[in-house]
């Protein structure tokens, strides 16, 4: 079964450093998303991406965040200057159609120290 | 604002008994409703969705959910629980199209052998 692949599985970074989280969505999917989950509980929407542009973003997704689909397969989330409160599991998801369920990756655990 | 509520943080059920995980949604347009499951240290897996049509929708692993418009509910059910069903369950909704999916706070299901 096709999978969404995320790398790395765990990233530790110092506060103020830049991190890039990588995702390879399912090849025929057109809609891409980033979510984050803090403490294994609340799942928060960050951003959605379609047709090479952001279609919606949340209040969390401020100027320190950016997304990119640099080569038609990867979908990246960049955090420019990490803060302690950015520590969370970050999930990438993709879907073939907007009203289909998402396929989520296994996540990247980001720890900011 | 669109939202879903999961009133129970945890549900305990004996193996072999029927299980119900509750979800209610805010009345805002015609909601697209979803259930996802998360096993420990894993991403979220899509179980089922309701867009339109039959109020009873069937999903993966023997789960089903009933859309009840008058009670604004979308409870997840299974006739006979398995120990392997123990996981975190998330109800979610969107307003359709490529609108973001908003997740509930999650319900931990514990199936007791």
Image (cartoon, coloured by chain):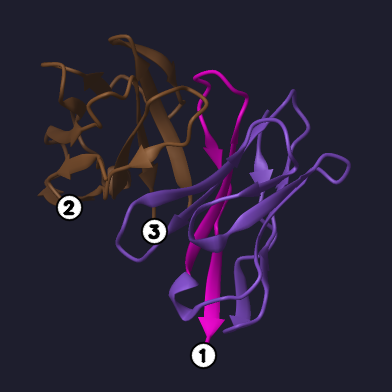
Chain colours: A brown, B purple
Pick the front one: B50 or A68: B50
Q: Is A17 drawn above or below residue B80 in the view shown? A: above
- Classify mark 3: residues with Cα within 10 Å, few (<14), some (14-19) or many (20+): few
Q: Secondary structure at mark 3?
A: loop
Tell me the quarter of the picture where residue B13 sits: bottom right
Mark 3 to mark 2 CA distance (whole Å): 16 Å
Look at the image and say whether residue B103 sits in the magenta stretch. yes
Magenta stretch in the rendered image: B87-113
User: Which one is closest to the eye, mark 3 or mark 2?
Assistant: 3
Give above or below for A32 relative to B6: above
Between discs 3 and 2, the one toward the N terminus: 3
Residue at the (19%, 18%) spot, across then down: A69
Q: Nearer the viewer, residue A83 or A24?
A: A24
Looking at the image, residue B63 sits to the left or right of residue A57; the answer is right
Q: Quadrant of residue A56?
A: top left
Check disc 1 and report the residue beneath it.
B113
Is A1 situated above or below B14? above
Dot 1, how many residues are within 10 Å of its Cα: few (below 14), some (14-19), or many (20+)?
few
Image-based side of A66 in relation to B12, left or right = left
Residue ranking furthest to the right: B70
Kind of element beneath mark 1: loop
**Residue A39's mark?**
3
Tag 2 residue: A113
The one nearer the camera, B106 or B111, is: B111
Q: Which residue occupies 20% across, 26% down?
A: A75
Label 2 is found on which chain of the structure? A
Magenta segment: does it hold B109? yes
The location of residue A103, given as percent across then percent down, is 36, 40
The quarter of the picture where the N terminus of chain B appears is top right
Give the residue at x 19% y 34%.
Answer: A23
Residue A43, position in %: x, y?
45, 46
CA separation in Å, label 2 and label 1: 40 Å
């Amino acid at each position: 079964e096709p999978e969404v692949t995320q790398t790395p599985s765990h990233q530790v970074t110092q506060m103020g450093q830049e991190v890039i989280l990588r995702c390879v969505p399912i090849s025929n999917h057109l809609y891409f998303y980033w979510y984050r989950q803090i403490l294994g509980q609340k799942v928060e929407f960050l951003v959605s991406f379609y047709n090479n542009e952001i279609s919606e973003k949340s209040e969390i997704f401020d100027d320190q965040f950016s997304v990119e689909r640099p080569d038609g397969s990867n979908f990246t989330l960049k955090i420019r200057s990490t803060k302690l409160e950015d520590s969370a599991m970050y999930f990438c998801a993709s879907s073939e159609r907007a009203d289909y369920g998402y396929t989520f990756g296994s996540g990247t655990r980001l720890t900011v120290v | 604002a669109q939202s879903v509520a999961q009133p129970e943080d945890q549900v305990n059920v004996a193996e072999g008994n029927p299980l119900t995980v509750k979800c209610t949604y805010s009345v805002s347009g015609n909601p697209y409703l979803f259930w996802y499951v998360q096993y420990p240290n894993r991403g979220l897996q899509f179980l089922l969705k309701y867009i339109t049509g039959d109020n009873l929708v069937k999903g993966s692993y023997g789960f089903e959910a009933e859309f009840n418009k008058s009670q604004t509910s979308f409870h997840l059910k299974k006739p006979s629980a398995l120990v392997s069903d123990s996981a975190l369950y998330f109800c979610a909704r969107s307003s359709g199209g490529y609108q973001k999916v908003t997740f509930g706070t999650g319900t931990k299901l514990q199936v007791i052998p």
